[in-house]
């Protein structure tokens, strides 16, 4: 039987939720399909791409465009390269991830007369593309064979311009390789963990300030991730007198080690497409506190049942729920057990089946 050939397209493999999902799906699909992973720009990566996946970089280094004309030219070059690779390898389906690559994917598939799927990974009402990409998105997205989003809120946004029957909600999968490293919750230390890019939207400032206001005793705060606000946050911990209690560990290859060490996970975003780090933390049995931001956390956490949801930017609520968990080991154990039970629908096998059905039904 001849294997169907599919190609995933993404801007880079730098650390991020979309990148993790693409690699997970590509590795999983390689068991049944001939898989190509086409990456626009080569970067350092923390993800392990299976040897069965054909990994292709279109450009060794990203060079931002300095004008509209230059941007158009560089994207025309990308399309030409994608079309050439698809023709040479007789690829049957193109699958794009993230807005700019989605547009290139639709254009390339139209030139090739091949079907495509595209996937949005952010909340489009918060992460608004510039005028150039917004015009292209609004024109080209209706020509897709299928748009995959993670939440009802994001589906509602795209229903304004895309036929509803083309839009499918498929949440992000839990990384099964990461899960294989999970340890029992009873072995955890007095560590509060957060994982994510250090920027204003992820809003780790809220957690740092809340932690500083509590009588934390022998608890520590560990912040995994990097970003533009790292130095500012480090200075803030010094100003608040808690620098000795806070570890900034940067981007890490072994994030499962940190999930296995922590007793509590906190997620303070102001907005999300779908919160991968929160899903990972719950899949490791961590009692979680998350802002009830648009969109995603409320589709993972049922407040007071398997975790806590708090208002965005509400430090007092965060302090109160942190205190509840820090002072109540029995509650932590309850939330830990409930978190594990609530994540079956996010296992890679379930997500894979939904993607596979879409791919096999494409003509």
Image (spheres, rainbow, N blue to C red):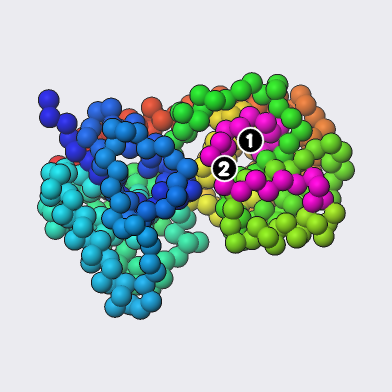
Tell me where residue 60 sits by quadrant.
bottom left
Element at label 2: loop
* 114 shown above or below 1: below
Circle 2 sits on which residue? 252
Element at label 1: helix
Q: Residue at x 46, y 28 (%)?
A: 177
Can residue 256 be seen? Answer: yes
Q: Position of residue 125 (x, y in %)?
A: 47, 61
97 or 304: which is nearer to us?
A: 97
Tell me where residue 132 sits by quadrant.
bottom left
92 with respect to 139 (left or right): left
Answer whether residue 260 is magenta in the image: yes
What residue span does the magenta drawing correspond to? 242-266
Q: Nearer the viewer, mark 2 or mark 1?
A: 2
78 or 103: which is nearer to us?
A: 78
Neighbour class for label 1 at 10 Å: few (<14), some, many (≥20)? many
Q: Residue at x 74, y 52 (%)?
A: 208
Q: Quadrant of the N terminus?
A: top left
Q: Residue at x 84, y 41 (%)?
A: 216
Q: Position of residue 305 (x, y in %)?
A: 65, 31
Query: Contact, CB < 8 Å: mark 2 with mark 1?
Result: yes
Residue pushed farthest front?
60
Q: Earlier in the sequence, mark 2 or mark 1?
A: 2
Circle 1 sits on which residue? 258
Q: Residue at x 30, y 43 (%)?
A: 55
Can residue 171 be seen? Answer: no
């Amino acid at each position: 039987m001849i294997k169907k050939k599919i190609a995933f397209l993404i801007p880079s493999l730098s650390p991020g939720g979309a990148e993790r999902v693409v690699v997970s799906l590509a590795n999983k699909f390689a068991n049944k399909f001939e898989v190509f992973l086409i990456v626009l720009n080569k970067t350092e990566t923390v993800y392990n791409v299976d040897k069965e996946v054909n990994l292709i970089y279109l450009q060794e280094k990203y060079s931002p465009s300095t004008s509209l004309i230059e941007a158009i030219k560089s994207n025309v070059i990308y399309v030409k390269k994608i079309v050439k690779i698809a023709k040479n390898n007789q690829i049957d389906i193109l699958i794009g991830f993230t807005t700019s690559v989605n547009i290139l994917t639709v254009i390339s598939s139209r030139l090739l007369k091949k079907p495509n799927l595209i996937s949005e990974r952010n909340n489009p009402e918060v992460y608004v593309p510039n005028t150039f990409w917004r015009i292209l998105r609004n024109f080209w997205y209706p020509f897709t064979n299928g748009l995959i989003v993670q939440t009802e809120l994001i589906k509602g946004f795209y229903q304004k311009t895309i036929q509803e029957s083309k839009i499918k909600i498929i949440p992000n999968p839990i990384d099964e390789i990461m899960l294989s490293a999970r340890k029992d919750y009873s072995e955890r230390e007095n560590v509060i963990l957060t994982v994510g890019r250090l920027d204003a939207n992820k809003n780790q400032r809220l957690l740092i300030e809340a932690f500083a206001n509590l009588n934390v005793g022998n608890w520590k705060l560990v912040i995994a991730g990097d970003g533009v606000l790292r130095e500012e946050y480090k200075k803030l911990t010094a100003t608040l007198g808690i620098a000795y209690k806070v570890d900034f560990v940067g981007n890490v290859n072994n994030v499962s080690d940190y999930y296995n060490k922590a007793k509590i996970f906190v997620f303070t975003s102001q907005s999300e497409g779908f919160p991968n780090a929160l899903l990972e933390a719950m899949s490791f049995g961590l009692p979680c506190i998350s802002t009830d931001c648009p969109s995603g956390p409320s589709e993972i956490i049922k407040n007071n049942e398997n975790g806590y949801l708090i208002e965005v930017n509400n430090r007092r609520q965060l302090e109160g729920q942190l205190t509840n968990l820090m002072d109540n080991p029995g509650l932590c154990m309850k939330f830990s057990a409930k978190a594990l039970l609530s994540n079956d629908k996010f296992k890679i096998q379930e997500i894979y089946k939904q993607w596979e059905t879409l791919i096999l039904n494409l003509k």
